[in-house]
Amino acid sequence: MPHRDALPWRPYPPLTDGERVVRARAFSDAMSSRRSCRMFSEARVPRDVIEAALAAAGSAPSGANRQPWHFAVVSSDEAKCAIRVAAEEEERAFYNGRAGSEWLDALWPLGTGADKPYLEVAPWLIVVFAQRRGGPDPDNLKQNYYVTESVGIACGLLLATLHQAGVATLVHTPSPMRFLNRVCRRPEHEKPLMVIVAGHPSADATIPATALDKKTLEQTASWL
Ligand code: IYR
């Protein structure tokens, strides 16, 4: 095997197959209660929770182990306001026609619109950047690989950890979102992918009924 500096595989905790099934189902059950939250309160979430979730995200597999992600963690009122103002400007153009009728029809059951108060109300906005190039030498950045896939996996782990910690989340994708480079002071070779809003739901929070429509295993998997 062409490993360099190979280390022995460290065994996972020994489990019976029955215990494996129980643990897999327990995690699946826990994740099945996750809902995207669009109505947040100002209730705080400790920074330690966000740091632990970012550490989980950083454990994701990535192309050539380049870990091509940067998380700009926003909690100041000024930066949250700047993101809300710029995002709502793009969203107004989106909802007033840029999206096109097919896309707007698809969103109609969700009841979303251009107003995004949660961008200022929720305690944390995690702005996720994909590093198309990276490395230790800023003057000679190297190509990264499978960047979107790698960052997507990292974001999944981040969302799962926050849910496990009892923190509500929303994946927000203003389009276009290049303004996030300016607000977060990130270089142009980093591509903003999404904003993960994290906090607690408001007392009157609701979810769209359609959020409970989930495809079945039969609809999503085939076995060969
Ligand atoms: N970015 C817009 C529109 C939007 C698009 C999709 I696809 C969604 O699943 C939800 C919203 C917004 O945040 O409203």
Image (cartoon, rainbow, N blue to C red):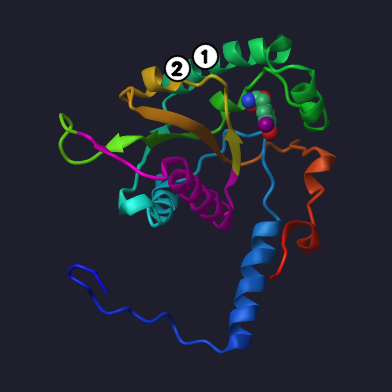
At mark 1, the secondary structure is helix
The reply, left or right, for residue 168 in relation to residue 186 is right
Can I make out residue 80 in this image?
Answer: yes
How dense is the environment of label 1, judged by Cα within 10 Å: few (below 14), some, or many (20 and up)? some
Q: Disc 2 or 1, which lies upstream in sequence?
A: 1
The reply, left or right, for residue 125 in relation to residue 204 is left
Q: Residue at x 77, y 22 (%)?
A: 104
In what quadrant does ligand 1 lie? top right
Q: Amino acid at mark 2?
A: Phe
Question: Residue 211: horizontal and vertical position, in percent?
Answer: 78, 43
Looking at the image, do the residues carrying marks 2 and 1 touch, with CB atoms under 8 Å apart?
yes
Q: Which residues are magenta?
A: 141-168
Question: Residue 204: horizontal and vertical position, in percent?
Answer: 76, 35
Q: Residue at x 45, y 17 (%)?
A: 179
The reply, left or right, for residue 59 in relation to residue 33 is left
Relative to 198, say whether 4 is above or below. Answer: below
Look at mark 1 in the image and give the residue it sits on.
86
Look at mark 2 in the image and give the residue it sits on.
179
Name the quadrant containing residue 115.
top right
